Image: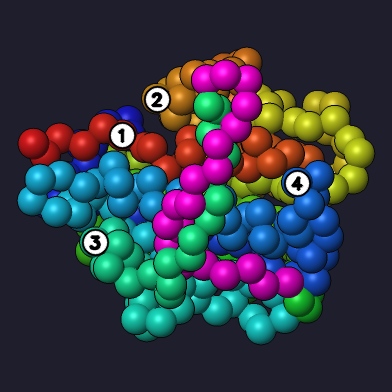
């Protein structure tokens, strides 16, 4: 169980995003955007980066299969709409071809003389900000487990799936720990699925990033999310270290009170599992 399988078009890996869309995600962050809006932007940018990294001279190579599960007042719907709505997971090339829309955004650039320049850039949108209802985390992770069992059965030789779960509150449909444990037992021949959890908050509190122990965590909810999280394989831990996080042996894929920069890093670290080998 070494997490060493090479990712290729013959043996892609799976990335599942599980995103809290409850009412509390409407709270404003320091960026001025709501938590839901910021997470949606970060996820859309992550999808675009994944597409870019898979793009070669012959087009977008299917190194990844991607799914998004939202959870809130409307249950656990597919977070990817339109042409992708009927698929639990979609190939990265299908994602590339089917954004809901492409928006024009303003990007600020350094002009080299102490000022800034504004540039209009195209911003594809696949996932939209939603914030309403409760927090059916257990149901969402159960759906995630069902998808991963089927995926691993069909991809026995692939690098194991990675689940990136982002939430801002406690589950309202019972404890999610048992189903989180089940997810971390789902496997390919190369290892068990990785479950990474990030808690996002607008409250003042010390951020916790990739701890190796639950000692000193703020409360029982933080401890629960820590216990639900996978120990990071060495190469994923190294990615986190490259981002400036001082990890100890046994660090888990867990953040608490994550700020905007942490959220962006969380997505980036979790979606770079291995280098691909197709040339």
Disc 1 to disc 3, C-alpha distance: 18 Å
Q: Position of residue 159 (x, y in %)?
A: 29, 43
The quadrant in which residue 35 appears is bottom right
Image marks 1 and 2: residues in contact by CB distance under 8 Å? yes
Depth check, front residue: 150 or 262:
262
Q: In the rendered image, which residue does mark 2 sit on?
A: 235
Marker disc for residue 230:
none
Disc 2 to disc 3, C-alpha distance: 26 Å
Q: Is residue 118 magenta?
A: yes
Depth-wise, is mark 2 or mark 3 nearer the camera? 3
Marker disc for residue 31:
4
Marker disc for residue 93:
3
Q: Position of residue 161 (x, y in %)?
A: 38, 51
Give the residue at the far right of this rendering. 204
- Mark 1 / mark 3, whichever is N-terminal: 3
Q: What residue is at 10 percent from the left and 45 percent from the top? A: 57
Q: Quadrant of the C terminus?
A: top left
Disc 2 to disc 4, C-alpha distance: 31 Å
The quadrant in which residue 30 appears is top right
Q: Position of residue 129 (x, y in %)?
A: 63, 68
Q: In the visual, does 158 lie left or right of 219?
A: left
Disc 4 to disc 1, C-alpha distance: 32 Å
């Amino acid at each position: 169980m070494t997490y060493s399988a090479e990712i290729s078009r013959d043996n892609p890996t799976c990335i599942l995003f599980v995103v809290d869309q409850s009412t509390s995600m409407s709270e404003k962050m320091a960026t001025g955007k709501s938590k839901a809006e910021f997470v949606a932007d970060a996820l859309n940018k992550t999808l675009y980066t994944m597409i870019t990294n898979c793009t070669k001279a012959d087009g977008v190579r299917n190194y990844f299969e991607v799914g998004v599960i939202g959870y809130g007042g409307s249950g656990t719907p597919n977070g990817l709409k339109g042409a992708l709505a009927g698929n639990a997971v979609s190939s990265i090339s299908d994602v590339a071809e089917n954004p809901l829309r492409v928006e024009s955004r303003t990007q600020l650039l350094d002009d080299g003389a102490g000022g800034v320049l504004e540039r209009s850039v195209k911003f594809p949108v696949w996932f939209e900000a939603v914030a309403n209802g409760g927090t059916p985390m257990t149901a969402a992770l159960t759906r995630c487990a069902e998808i991963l069992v089927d995926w691993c059965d069909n991809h026995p030789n692939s690098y194991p799936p990675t689940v990136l779960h982002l939430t801002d509150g406690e589950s309202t449909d019972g404890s999610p720990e048992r189903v989180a444990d089940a997810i971390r037992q789902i496997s390919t021949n190369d290892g068990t699925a990785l479950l990474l959890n990030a808690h996002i908050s607008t409250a003042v509190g010390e951020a916790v990033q990739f701890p190796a122990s639950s000692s000193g965590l703020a409360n029982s909810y933080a401890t629960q999310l820590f216990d639900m999280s996978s120990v990071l394989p060495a190469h994923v831990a190294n990615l986190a270290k490259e981002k400036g996080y001082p990890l100890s042996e046994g660090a888990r894929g867990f953040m608490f009170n994550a700020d905007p920069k942490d959220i962006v890093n969380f997505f980036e670290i979790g979606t770079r599992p291995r280098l691909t080998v197709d040339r």
